[in-house]
Image (tube, coloured by chain):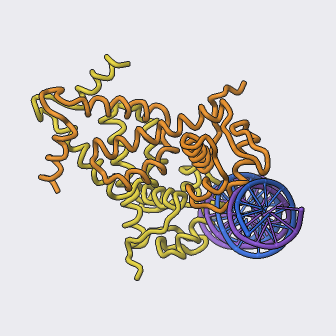
Chain colours: A orange, B yellow, C purple, D blue
Amino acid sequence: MVSAGSNNLSASLEDYLEAIFNLAGESNVARSKDIANLLGVSRSSVTGALRVLKKKGLVNYEPYDFVTLTRAGQAAAAEVVRKHNVLKSFFVDVLGVEIDIAQRAACKAEHTLGPEVITRLLCFIEFVTQSGRNGCDLAEEFKRFCKNGL
Amino acid sequence: MVSAGSNNLSASLEDYLEAIFNLAGESNVARSKDIANLLGVSRSSVTGALRVLKKKGLVNYEPYDFVTLTRAGQAAAAEVVRKHNVLKSFFVDVLGVEIDIAQRAACKAEHTLGPEVITRLLCFIEFVTQSGRNGCDLAEEFKRFCKNGL
DNA sequence: CAATATAGTTAGTCTTGCCTAACTTTGTCA
DNA sequence: TGACAAAGTTAGGCAAGACTAACTATATTG
């Protein structure tokens, strides 16, 4: 039995899915050229990836036509994006990492962290960023701690 | 100019390096078969990796002889191991993730996080695990927070 | 409506990283 | 010391994922 949520997606395919998700979110349309630009790959690589994603039932795709995500594709993409955002938020809001670096690090790490870590991390971000918890903002306190240490 | 610290290592090669480092740490000798077992790859894959690592000046290697790390190889391996340990420590000691899961997650994520994130993370672990900071252990407090939330 | 630019695809190649099967070297022991 | 087992290597193959170059389809516009 293969549930809809069981993704055997490579990191590369997850990147394509995320790109399509983000592009479609803006203009409701994902053009091959824009995907290629966003990911920094050639247009022919995009074509290849679309064929694979179609075979996996994640995108609606016919040659020379626009691309949309299927139900399953949306779910898979949303999970990737969620991971991405959790990580980026942790890097930026908690660790105080520069946003561009955090962006790239999140995009590379998002594929490797399973639900246990991501769930805990999300929880931890909430825990840390709820200000005034003990009359102090932890993220803020950490930044001060850092300046002393470094 | 190519400094000794500039590693163009793939995730895969970093895994081999780490394995050699760990094996050599125990018995001062890294046998091909043990590397293969540790990484779950075939012996011939190890041979291939050793050739590449030798070409990069990271291991001393002659066919049918034992393997040792060069100076540069030790430095590179130590950095990988350091990342690994920082991540694992964060997952286990701060987030409270189960140790086996943390181990695997750390091994997969260690290749993708650059020095900015790792340095900050290390600092953050110190910050969080210094108990009695405000009369409370943060990691401990987070575990309680989690139980309520989940 | 035809010419042309842009978008998309196809074909063929390369690299990385892994595998199996067969071969070679090394080491052990009767 | 010679035979056999274990370790290591080589040869050959496969899949993923990317590229370039050349071809096709679509869209624009005079």
In the rendered image, the vertical position of residue A106 relative to residue B29, given as above or below: above
Q: Residue furthest left?
A: B135
Q: Total of numbered circles in the picture?
A: 0
| x, y percent for residue B146 | 32, 23
Does residue B63 appear left or right of residue A107 in this picture?
A: right
Which residue lies at the image location 67% right of the left edge and 53% below the top edge?
A: A32
| x, y percent for residue A90 | 34, 41
- Judge by depth and name the residue closer to the eye, B31 or D24: D24
- Judge by depth and name the residue closer to the eye, A148 or B108: A148
Q: Identify the image quadrant of the N terminus of chain B.
A: bottom left
Q: Identify the image quadrant of the C terminus of chain B.
A: top left
Does residue B4 appear left or right of residue C15 in this picture?
A: left
Which residue lies at the image location 40% right of the left edge and 57% below the top edge?
A: B80
- Judge by depth and name the residue closer to the eye, B20 or B1: B1
Q: Residue furthest bottom?
A: B1
| x, y percent for residue A134 | 14, 27
- Judge by depth and name the residue closer to the eye, B139 or A24: A24
Query: Could you say which quadrant of the image residue A8 lies in?
Result: top right
Query: Could you say which quadrant of the image residue B115 lies in?
Result: bottom left
Which residue lies at the image location 10% right of the left edge and 29% below the top edge?
A: B135
Which residue lies at the image location 67% right of the left edge and 25% below the top edge?
A: A3
| x, y percent for residue A140 | 18, 41
